[in-house]
């Protein structure tokens, strides 16, 4: 269950990150967005995917589940940033 | 209207920098010790390799409980301090009889299967970091208020950091430029670890303040969740503990965790699994007959509930393995955030004042930050290399920790480094020396454990994880020595 939650959180974080200039730069897109709507669309989609991972966190109580969800998002985000940093350093 | 005006921003930056440079060193060691204390049970198991003979999931026997009561009786006759019993749990299968020695809980280790006393070496183990975390190993009257003040300042530093970065928080969320100049990389790391772990920083700091309310806010009356009144008399129970624990399981539905004794009374605390709240309602039993005593039936109020939640979030005792590991990772990243902030400040200062002599902060930085890692490894290494039956070995271990740390801090003040190597290379040289020492000591720790714990026991889960983390940290330190050689200074 834990790995399923992480598997959902990872694309969620990346999708949310697609609305950020640094990630777009690494992905080879234009850093500037043609319109703000597209930027917020990415954030909304990423946020919804992250929210979908909440019930997947394997915890016996609601409070523990929320705590686990928050910590997993933080950790996956840090790992994403580290991975993107390495990708940028390699280029 | 803009809230963060340039003038306010300048004031916030001044506060963030000044508070960081004055208190950051202590904040760093408090966070490091707190992170290590999350794994205090596992560290104690690692530091007492003799207990590796007790298998995980060993069943607690009545004979072991009887033997524990017998030891308590002998201790009472000999006039030793009062003890309590820590029962086997999933994290530690041994039965412990513990007493407070002024700094940590130490005592005998008993095999729960047959009640045999395990000749475990005398050490404070991981509990050393728990005590160090909230007292800095100072007397309680000084240590606790000091840590409370630092916690309050840390809360304000986090707030000022968030306000300073609020405009760039979302756009810079994933930004980590590994190949940039050293100050830029350090600032990225500081901001990244600060931003992604912001919920954790806020939770840990403010729950820490709740725990320290009495010291941080002396004007607020504090009501502790459960503190039995002090009464005189024999605290060793006449009743057998086996039936008491069986009744506890039946009544509460939880596994028992601790047994605390007071004259005529046995108090059993349960273990929570996967719950955040720290304090569980204990059950009281008659010390002579073993019968359940009527307890306090009044339900816990909202304030009590919030206090227990805050305690649980900070102490992380009942969270379960997954959440505990996440908490540990959060602690490591918080420590990285503080360390990167401190190193960033000193590196930036060096760039701005190339011609001036290194300041105290700059001289202190390698020893205070990198030296803490050296001191931790020295503590573990002394535990494994000092003779197991050496008198006073516990003191040698803790003194070794502080001695190693102070020596590393003094390394930055050695005059020859600056004269020989020149100003820019000076701090890099000290950093390389400290990191090399940390790397080599860490590798020695892993090798010493392999030498001491021979056979399949070395491959035991807890030992494997701790040795693996030590190995990775040591290699990272050695990689840092190499990386510093190649890294651009400006």
Image (tube, rainbow, N blue to C red):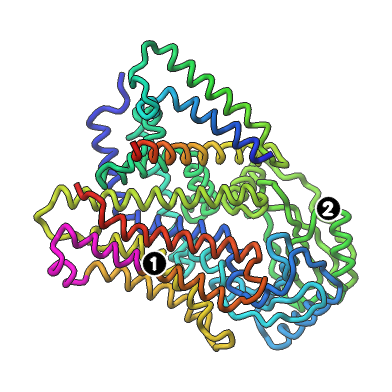
Image location of residue B315, percent across then percent down: 59, 54
Q: Is residue B417 magenta?
A: yes
Q: Chain of mark 1?
A: B
Report the front residue among B478 and B244: B478
Image location of residue B370, percent across then percent down: 36, 62
Is most of the magenta stretch helix, strand or loop?
A: helix
* Location of mark 2 (residue): B252
Report the front residue among B202 and A44: A44
Image location of residue B319, percent across then percent down: 66, 49
| Quarter of the figure with residue B85 | bottom right
* Label 2 packing within 10 angstroms: few (<14), some (14-19), many (20+): some
Q: Is residue B301 visible?
A: yes
Toward the left, the furthest residue is B355
Q: Is residue B465 left or right of residue B381?
A: right
Tell me the CA gap for discs 2 and 1. 47 Å
Q: Which residues are magenta?
A: B414-436
Residue occupying image coordinates x 51% and y 43%: B200
Q: Chain of mark 2?
A: B
* Location of mark 1 (residue): B438
Residue occupying image coordinates x 57% and y 47%: B326
Q: In the displayed structure, would residue B483 be above or below residue B78? A: above
Image location of residue A26, percent across then percent down: 37, 30
* Label 1 packing within 10 angstroms: few (<14), some (14-19), many (20+): many
Report the front residue among B279 and B427: B427
Establish whether labels 2 and 1 are both on one chain.
Answer: yes
Q: Is residue B80 left or right of residue A32?
A: right
Report the front residue among B125 and B156: B125
Q: Secondary structure at mark 1?
A: helix
């Amino acid at each position: 269950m834990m790995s399923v939650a992480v598997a959902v959180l990872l694309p969620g974080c990346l999708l949310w990150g697609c609305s950020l200039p640094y990630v777009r730069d690494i992905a080879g897109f234009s850093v500037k967005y043609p319109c703000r709507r597209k930027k917020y669309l990415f954030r909304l989609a990423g946020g919804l995917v992250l929210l979908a991972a909440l019930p997947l966190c394997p915890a016996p109580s609601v409070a523990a589940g929320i705590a686990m969800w928050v910590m997993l998002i933080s950790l996956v985000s840090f790992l994403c940033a580290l991975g993107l940093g390495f990708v940028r350093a390699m280029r | 209207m803009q809230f963060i005006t340039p003038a306010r921003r300048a004031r916030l930056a001044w506060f963030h920098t000044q508070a960081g440079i004055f208190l950051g060193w202590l904040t760093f060691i408090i966070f490091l010790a707190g992170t290590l204390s999350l794994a205090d049970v596992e560290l104690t198991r690692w530091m007492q390799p003799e207990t590796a003979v007790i298998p995980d999931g060993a069943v607690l026997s009545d004979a072991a409980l009887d033997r524990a009561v017998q030891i308590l009786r002998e201790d009472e006759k000999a006039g030793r301090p009062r003890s309590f019993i820590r029962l086997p749990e999933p994290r530690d299968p041994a039965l412990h009889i513990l007493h407070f020695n002024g700094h940590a809980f130490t005592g005998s280790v008993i095999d729960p299967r047959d009640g045999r006393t395990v000749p475990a070496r005398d050490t404070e183990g991981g509990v050393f970091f728990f005590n160090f975390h909230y007292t800095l190993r100072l007397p309680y009257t000084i240590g606790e208020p000091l840590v409370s003040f630092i916690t309050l300042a840390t809360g304000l530093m986090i707030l000022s950091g968030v306000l300073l970065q609020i405009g760039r928080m979302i756009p810079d969320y994933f930004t980590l430029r590994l190949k940039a100049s050293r100050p830029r990389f350090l600032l990225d790391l500081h901001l990244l670890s600060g931003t992604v772990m912001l919920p954790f920083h806020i939770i840990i700091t403010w729950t820490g303040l709740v725990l320290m309310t009495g010291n941080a806010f002396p004007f607020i009356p504090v009501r502790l969740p459960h503190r039995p009144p002090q009464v005189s008399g024999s605290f060793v129970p006449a009743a057998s503990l086996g039936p008491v624990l069986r009744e506890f399981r039946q009544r509460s539905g939880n596994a028992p965790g601790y047994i605390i004794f007071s004259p005529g009374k046995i108090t059993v605390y349960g273990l929570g699994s996967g719950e955040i709240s720290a304090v569980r309602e204990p059950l009281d039993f008659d010390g002579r007959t073993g019968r359940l005593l009527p307890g306090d039936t009044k339900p816990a109020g909202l304030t009590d509930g919030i206090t227990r939640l805050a305690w649980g979030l900070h102490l992380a005792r009942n969270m379960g393995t997954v959440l505990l590991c996440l908490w540990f990772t959060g602690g490591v990243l918080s420590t990285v955030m503080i360390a990167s902030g401190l190193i960033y400040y000193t590196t930036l200062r060096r760039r701005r004042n190339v011609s001036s002599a290194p300041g105290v902060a700059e001289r202190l930085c390698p020893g205070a930050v990198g030296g803490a890692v050296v001191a931790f490894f020295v503590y573990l290494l002394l535990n494994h290399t000092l003779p197991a039956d050496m008198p006073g070995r516990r003191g040698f271990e803790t003194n070794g920790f502080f001695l190693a740390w102070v020596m590393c801090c003094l390394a930055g003040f050695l005059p020859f480094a600056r004269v020989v190597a020149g100003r820019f290379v000076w701090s890099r040289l000290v950093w390389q020396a400290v990191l090399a020492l940390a790397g080599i000591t860490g590798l020695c720790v892993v090798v010493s454990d392999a030498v001491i714990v021979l056979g399949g026991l070395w491959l035991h889960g807890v030992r494997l994880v701790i040795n693996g983390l030590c190995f990775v940290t040591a290699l990272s330190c050695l990689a840092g020595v190499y990386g510093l050689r190649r890294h651009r200074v400006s």
